[in-house]
Image: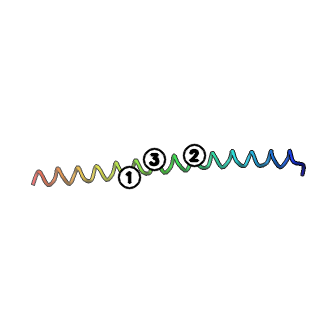
Amino acid sequence: MSRSTVHRDQSGLVGKMIVIWLVMIALISVAAIDTVSIAFTKFRASTLAGGAA
């Protein structure tokens, strides 16, 4: 393999890693937002139920 071939292969690998990291960050962000939303809804429901009792 020549140096240009190795460099081309590595740049493709870096691009794939960036895409994978961005997808992982997006999935973690969506999961975190969903978790906070569920926790807030449960807290609000329990507060309303306590107030109604």
| x, y percent for residue 9 | 79, 48
Tag 1, which secondary structure?
helix
User: Which is in the foreground here, disc 3 or disc 2?
Assistant: 2
Q: Which residue is mark 2?
A: 22
Q: Residue furthest left?
A: 53
Tag 2, which secondary structure?
helix
Image disc number at residue 7 = none
Give whichever of discs 1 and 2 has the lower sequence position: 2
* Amino acid type of the residue tagged 2 in the rendering: Leu
**18 lies left or right of 34:** right
Which residue lies at the image location 74% right of the left edge and 45% below the top edge?
A: 12
* Amino acid type of the residue tagged 3 in the rendering: Val
* Amino acid type of the residue tagged 1 in the rendering: Thr
Q: Which residue is mark 1?
A: 35
Q: Nearer the viewer, residue 35 or 6?
A: 6
Q: Kindly indicate whether the residue at mark 2 contacts the one at mark 3 (C-beta within 8 angstroms).
A: no
**23 lies left or right of 29:** right
Q: Which residue is mark 3?
A: 30
Which residue lies at the image location 27% right of the left edge and 53% below the top edge?
A: 42
